[in-house]
Amino acid sequence: MRIRLKVWRQESGDDAGKMVSYLLENVNPDMSFLEMLDTLNEQLLQEGSRPVEFDHDCREGICGQCGVMINGRAHGPLLHTTTCQLHMRVFKDNEEIFIEPFRAIAFPVKCDLKIDRTAFDRVIQSGGFIAVNTGQAPEANSIPIGSPEIEAAFDAAACIGCGACVAVCKNSSAALFTSAKISHLALLPQGAIEAQDRVIRMVDQMDKEGFGHCSNTEACEAECPQEISVLHIARMNWEYNKAQVLKK
Amino acid sequence: MLDAKIPDGPLEEKWNHYKAHAKLVNPANRKKLDVIVVGAGLAGSSIAASLGEMGYRVKSFCFQDTPRRAHSVAAQGGVNACKNYKNDGDSVYRMFYDTIKGGDFRAREGNVYRLAECSANLIDQAVAQGVPFGREYGGYLNNRSFGGVQVSRTFYARGQTGQQLLLGAYQALMRQVGAGAVQLFARHEMLDLVVVDGKARGIIVRNMDTGEIERHGAHAVVLATGGFGKIYYLSTLAMGCNGSAIWRAHKRGAYMASPSWTQIHPTSLPQSGEYQSKLTLMSESLRNDGRIWVPKHKGEQRLPNQVPEEERDYYLERRYPAFGNLSPRDIASRAAKERIDAGYGVGPLKNGVYLDFSKAIKDQGEDKIRKKYGNLFRMYEKMTGVNAYQEPMRISPSAHFSMGGLWVDYELMTTIPGLFALGEANFADHGANRLGANSLLQASIDGYFIAPYTMANYLADEIKTGPIDIRHAAFAAAEETVQTQLRHLLAIQGNLGADYFHKTLGKILYDKCGLTRSREGLEAAIKEITALREQFYQHLYVPGGYAINSELEKAGRVADYLELGELMCYDALTRNESCGAHFRVEYQTPDGEAMRNDQDFSFISAWEWAGVNKTPQLHKEPLHFEFVTPTVRSYK
């Protein structure tokens, strides 16, 4: 198949950047989206031009490194699918595809489609953990946790930190990302002890990083490749309010 | 003579004895000691976090943009531990025996026993961190069975066990970063090791965003940089996985052990075209309920569901009735290759075999199968467009795990004092074949429970050293080596990208140093790789400059692969036996099983770098079996 691309090119963080058109003949429908970009880069290399920089690593949907806006949608047209798992069979012959980086104030563009998502690390550093040192753990089965409870915690813990939720949000809010970690840990007896302190610190850090507020459009859930539910945001708000009231 | 420093005494007392007598560093002195940890997967994050908690000054480096993306994240099936929660006869000894037998008696008894001994503790640690392992309805932890064993000792978190264990370690690490105990350097790639007066004293790294070259000094350096299976180009590994950190340490004097022992995983998705960049892994856990088969007739044209039962060859069940579809990976992969090479392969390129769930779905119902493997079936459908509830999956073998790596002693220290290697980056515990769900285990155990003790034993003698001076001539020389190489790669200005050389090397290795090897093939491979390396330095094209430049990163890694690949062939060539993943066609039984030679090859091959285009030097570490008797490994 033939694909007409419009790709965001930006030399560096300071550069203004612009959309550039490329034409790809002979795209195989079984190619993944990133393999299609590999093919573009191969072509650019042959022409002696600089290939397109884009984030990717595991290419099986779990590392969370890849992610671009494809025709205005985070990770492209399919639901619950990362960019690397998207295949060209989804597109039509001669289709025009717009590719842009995930955009947010807290995610500055570094080069072309590559962005800086270290803000997420700092949100986790502020409290997204259970404070247990190596060696302190009791026997695992001494903390029984019901199967439904562990499954609910898992649904939140499944977040891959790709940032699609932020990119798709009109406020560039990180509420879904932050709440997934708060929920994962608050739902477990091991994590409940620090829940109060954790939620205040993480929400504060989220604000400091320049992420916007949540205005309940639920676009994040719609685009999340891991199907993280917006109900976690409700839990975060509940935990936050509870913590503020009970704060000593 | 290589000394593995295995403590004397009975097997079950060795590690306790070591811990009771190892030197300690008192808490007040720890803050005078700097440690560098390269790699932030399960092994790297766990050691960096643990050392930070103890009070050492730690710097953690990784090439990813955050440690949470390290490739441990992709491990699916589970992690082994001999908790014996199933009351099915598991014990430390049983797990030790399964692992050493699974490795075809090519690992150290002392190391393997310690791995089994510490396994139970890891589950405790992970649960305390909030890792959501699967549970029974009563609230207690659940287990599943995995290849190569007859008990259920595998703990799992859906099909994302690696992700959850890594996030546990990552969160522990982030906690230390937030507390100021660990400094994090993401998007930094180690390009050289600095050795001062025979000791590892630091590293040279490149900031992959700005292109700046930096020097970092420390009293000890840990390499936890994972495996180098990506050398085959098509593999189950992430695109960024590489062997550069360990290879550059090797060139500074650290020995490489058994580099040719690469696990070829039996259940990955088959290649579908030349453009392909990786082969996605489907968890081995699928073999618990999936049955593997090929048609009995060559050139079968019917769709899989139309092939009647009696015309299907369930070749693993046929050849290995005792273990059947749960035969260990090396055996399952080789059996698949045998059928594919004989012309029974399935799919458009005839390069796969079927993994069929129809019987399990009939027996247990689709819901139960969906609950166990739903995310894997969904992933399969995303990748291939095929619904595996309705027709069998197509799978094929793919390069996966490096049993080989830097040679380390019982303390996980390489031949360079002060340089430690943890997790997949070392060669230690899996022998010639790793059992499923033992990689997450080994990475975690090394980082949480072994290195914190053995590194203290080393660092106890460093408290009077004082800060490491990065103005030392050795730092300047190493930096110059790095700068020269980068300049050189950029200056060649040929017409072929790094991927071309990587793919070509991968093909050579798959054909001649893959699932089967022969003297003739390996000798040819060494010549082909030497020639390819010459071409590389004549025709490589790296566009762009020093700042963000993926092509420059790839070129540096491929330059290292072109040397490492050659060493793999030497390693395979000198081992005139078949064991585990290493199958030399000259050494097989009449029915095609591996023929080990304990008389002449019961040793670990440890290689010393001799220089480019020079034959590397082989050192042998003899393996002693005091507690088990190596037997012919049979799964029949």
Image (spheres, coloured by chain):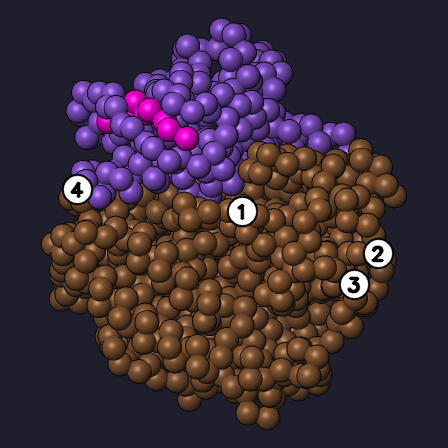
Chain colours: A purple, B brown
Magenta range: A1-9
Q: Residue at (31%, 36%) from the top-left corner?
A: A40
Principal SS element in the magenta part?
strand
Mark 2 belongs to which amino acid? Glu
Q: Which residue is mark 2?
A: B310
Of label 1 and label 2, which has the lower sequence position? Answer: 1
Q: Residue furthest bottom?
A: B599
* Quarter of the N terminus of chain B within the rendering: bottom left
Mark 4 belongs to which amino acid? Gly
User: Which chain contains the residue that carries disc 3?
Assistant: B
Q: Residue at (27%, 61%) from the top-left corner?
A: B559
Q: Real-space Cα distance between discs 2 and 4?
A: 57 Å
Q: Residue at (34%, 57%) from the top-left corner?
A: B502
Q: Nearer the viewer, mark 1 or mark 3?
A: 3
- Choose between A55 and A180: the one closer to the eye: A55
Mark drawn on residue B317 = 3
**In the rendered structure, are the residues bearing label 3 and label 4 in contact, judged by CB atoms less than 8 Å apart?**
no
Mark 3 belongs to which amino acid? Glu
Marks 1, 2 in one chain: yes
Q: In terms of image quadrants, where is residue B601?
A: bottom right
* Percent x, y of residue A207: 40, 17
Q: Real-space Cα distance between discs 1 and 3?
A: 25 Å
Q: Real-space Cα distance between discs 3 and 4?
A: 54 Å
**In the rendered structure, are the residues bearing label 2 and label 4 in contact, judged by CB atoms less than 8 Å apart?**
no
Quick one: label 1, few (<14), some, or many (20+) residues within 10 Å? many
Q: Real-space Cα distance between discs 2 and 3?
A: 14 Å
User: Up-down: is B220 above or below A215?
Assistant: below
Secondary structure at numbered mark 3: helix
Horizontally, residue B422 falls left or right of residue A109, namely right
